[in-house]
Image (spheres, rainbow, N blue to C red):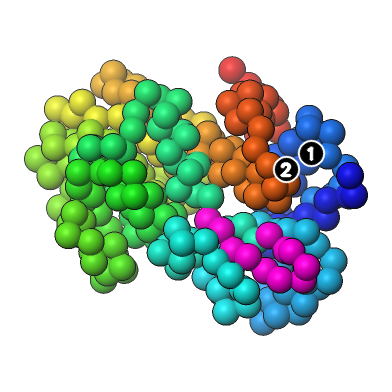
Amino acid sequence: MADLRLAVIGDPIAHTLSPLIQGKMMERLGVPGSYDAHLVHTEGLGDFVKFARENLDGFNITIPHKSHILPYLDGIDTYAASCGAVNTVRVTDGKLYGFNTDGNGIVSALRLMGVSFQGARVSLLGAGGAALSICKKALEMGAKSVTVFCRTPAKAAAMAEDPRVTVRSFDQLSADSCGKVSDVIVNATPLGMSGIDSNFSDFSFLDGTSAAVCDIVYKPAETSLLRECAARGIRCCNGLNMLIYQAIYAFEIFLGQSFNRDDMGAYLGKEVRKALGQEA
């Protein structure tokens, strides 16, 4: 097998765990090659694309280029197109094909909790790129409804086009509008993330809930939201499995074949927690 030449781009990029995760997958599967992180500013995206066409087999994309990459693509997956964002690009014969694996990442994270979007009433906190990807996947998987809570409802316009989606202001978040009427609650905001000053003002929206809660933040391992869930006996998980599984799906795209995702997921979970100092 020829060496697989892969990369990840973003700005900033120093924090990325992608080289660790993808490198461990290559090592475990015996796939020769390299996976490098590239700091790419917006004005340099075109130059990187030219480099990628000539030198890479694929690359991942993080903030702020998930939508900026769209004009450079020669083809795009249907789900990624609906999200208006791409996090994985396969390069074939110099042509760029875009995919978005975030949705499959959240579905896998929920599955490991014994939870599904199918027929679920979903409350989604946030309206950024990750939230849009999750909303699209929830609807694709047959969610009964999705209620989006965000600070700027206009940002959720693309989500509100579906009749199953209701958009509310973040200050309308309450037990009656969220906790008591949800089967799944997903926090897709950075609230509670390490290095972010902002946090939830209170957690009364969890009152009376029987929902499963997923916080896509993975650092710290236990956010204030997850601590509240644990204290209330609510099923919950952080964003580590979403991070790992979206990477697994991306690597399958690069490799052009599938493998045992759960075996790989368990292995990567240990390796990433070790790297983050979050060993159980």
The type of residue carrying mark 1 is Met
The kind of secondary structure the magenta stretch mainly shows is strand
Q: Residue at x 59, y 38 (%)?
A: 244
Q: Is residue 181 left or right of residue 190?
A: left
Per the image, label 2 sits on a secondary structure element best described as helix
Q: Is residue 106 above or below residue 28?
A: below
Q: Is residue 227 above or below residue 147?
A: above
Q: Mark 1 and 2 residues: CB-CB less than 8 Å, in contact?
A: yes
Queried whether the magenta region covers residue 92, the answer comes back as yes
Closer to us: 114 or 78: 78
Is residue 128 within the magenta segment? no
Which residue is rendered at x = 89% and y = 49% of the image? 3
Q: Is residue 245 left or right of residue 135?
A: right
Residue 53 rendering spot, x and y as whole percentages: 78, 71
Residue 138: x, y in percent? 33, 46
- Neighbour tally class for label 2: few under 14, some 14-19, many 20 plus, Cα within 10 Å: many
Choose top left, top right, bottom left or bottom right for residue 226.
Answer: top left
Q: Quadrant of the C terminus?
A: top right
Instruction: Quickly name the residue at label 2.
Output: 22
Q: Is residue 120 left or right of residue 260?
A: left
- The residue to which callout 1 is attached is 26
Is residue 36 visible in the rendered structure shown here?
Answer: no
Counting from the top left corner in percent of width and height, residue 69 is at: 59, 72
Residue interval drawn in magenta:
90-100
Q: Residue at x 62, y 74 (%)?
A: 74
Identified at 84% across, 33% down, the residue is 30
Between 254 and 269, the one nearer to me in the picture: 254
The crowding category of the residue bearing disc 1, from other C-alpha atoms within 10 Å (few below 14, some 14 to 19, many at least 20), is: some
Q: Which mark is residue 235?
A: none
SS of the residue under disc 1: helix
Q: Camera-side residue: 43 or 35?
A: 35
User: How much space separates mark 1 and mark 2, taking CA atoms?
Assistant: 6 Å
